[in-house]
Amino acid sequence: MFQVSPEKPEDGLKIEELLDQLFGPGRHRRAAYCLRGDGQALAELCFVMRGPGFLCASIRYWPVLIDGGHAALLLGPLAVGQAWRNRGFGKLLISHSLARAKTLGHLRVLVIGEKDYYQPFGFSTNLAAGLVLPEATNSGCFQACALTPGALDGLSGLVSPG
Ligand SMILES: CC(C)(COP(=O)(O)OP(=O)(O)OC[C@H]1O[C@@H](n2cnc3c(N)ncnc32)[C@H](O)[C@@H]1OP(=O)(O)O)[C@@H](O)C(=O)NCCC(=O)NCCS
């Protein structure tokens, strides 16, 4: 009945509505939005959870650079509609998309989000310790994950839109 599937162009408006509902009209001022710059989400890593005839959740990723030269993915936004919470949809979207990212050869992923939620997927604040966000406001929730062992070793510096 419910399934993860690639985001389609016609999903765009519904996803915008969902993001407005969940993050509010001020969402474009959040630190993660600054890191997305004017670029596009990575289409090959944008997935939705669909029910019969409707969309209930979305995950997107954006390209960023660490210290100007090391490519990384920025996970988010992840949004699950209020009516569809606590069914595992958020976690399913994360595991599905991270597996795809790894298959595609991506090395590292960053996220600004709840530690308890992302930790089981390999994210940790320690791995992000040397990385600096353009805005310090959410830095306590800033985490990183290595998709291949050692992919974050020795990396430090400013994270910028990729
Ligand atoms: C956070 C969010 C994505 C979770 O989606 P979901 O599909 O309801 O979550 P899941 O069903 O996969 O996981 C549920 C588990 O995560 C926990 N959880 C949910 N939101 C959480 C949060 N913000 N922080 C920590 N844990 C959280 C639940 O307590 C539950 O725990 P349990 O498995 O031990 O019972 C969803 O609540 C949401 O869209 N929130 C608003 C937008 C947001 O905050 N997005 C994330 C920012 S990057």
Image: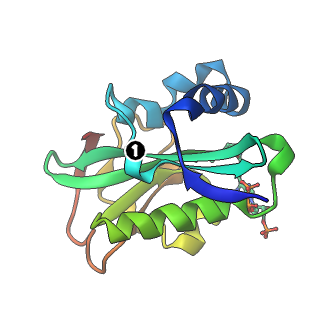
The residue positioned 40% from the left and 44% from the top of the image is 43
In the picture, measured across the screen, residue 4 lies left or right of residue 162, that is right
Q: Nearer the viewer, residue 137 or 16?
A: 16
Q: Is mark 1 on a helix, strand or loop?
A: helix
Question: What's the colour scheme?
Answer: rainbow
The residue positioned 68% from the left and 24% from the top of the image is 24
Quadrant where the image shows the C terminus = top left
84 lies above or below 31? below
68 lies above or below 24? below
In the picture, measured across the screen, residue 39 lies left or right of residue 116, that is left
Q: Residues within 10 Å of mark 1 (few under 14, many from 20)?
A: some
Residue sitting at the far bottom: 149
In the picture, measured across the screen, residue 86 lies left or right of residue 20, that is right
Q: Which amino acid does label 1 sit on?
A: Ala
44 lies above or below 28? below
Rendering coords of residue 116 (x, y %): 65, 65
Quadrant where the image shows the N terminus = bottom right
Q: Can residue 80 be seen in this view?
A: no
Rendering coords of residue 40 (x, y %): 35, 33
* Disc 1 target residue: 43
Q: Can residue 44 be seen in this view?
A: yes
How many numbered marks have been drawn onto this rendered protein structure?
1
Ligand 1 falls in quadrant = bottom right
Residue sitting at the far right: 83
Identify the image quadrant of residue 41. top left
The residue positioned 30% from the left and 80% from the top of the image is 149
Residue sitting at the far front: 53
